[in-house]
Amino acid sequence: MNTGTAALIGALRGPLILMALGALLCAHRFSGVSFSKTWPVLLIVLGVMKLLQRLTAPAVNEPVTPGTKGGQA
């Protein structure tokens, strides 16, 4: 993928976290589902967004130095 996609996913992280938080607090308020049982959803959303950002980020080419295998010293 290109850097534009990775930047878009990075830009969406904050708004998606806020929407997930709002949905969880709304569920706590109106349906009786305790926030203390649903807060891990925020960690899942953060993890999925970070994973998508890493998958769409361009590959970084490490310089290969002479006499080493794969650029490792």
Image: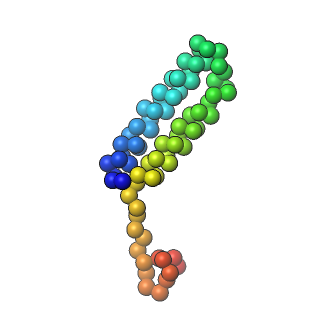
- Residue 61's place in the image compared with 3, above or below, is below
| Residue under the point 53% across and 27% down | 21
Closest to the observer, 60 or 48: 48
Residue at the front extreme of this rendering = 1
| Residue under the point 40% across and 54% down | 57
- Residue 28, quarter of the rendered image: top right
Residue 38 at x, y percent in the picture? 63, 28
The colour scheme used here is rainbow
| Residue under the point 66% across and 21% down | 34
Residue 27 at x, y percent in the picture? 58, 19
Residue at the bottom extreme of this rendering = 67
Closest to the observer, 72 or 45: 45
| Residue under the point 48% across and 29% down | 18
Residue 5 at x, y percent in the picture? 35, 47
- Residue 60's place in the image compared with 13, above or below, is below
Residue 19 at x, y percent in the picture? 47, 27
Count the labels in the image.
0
Residue at the top extreme of this rendering = 30
Horizontal relation, residue 23 to residue 34: left or right: left
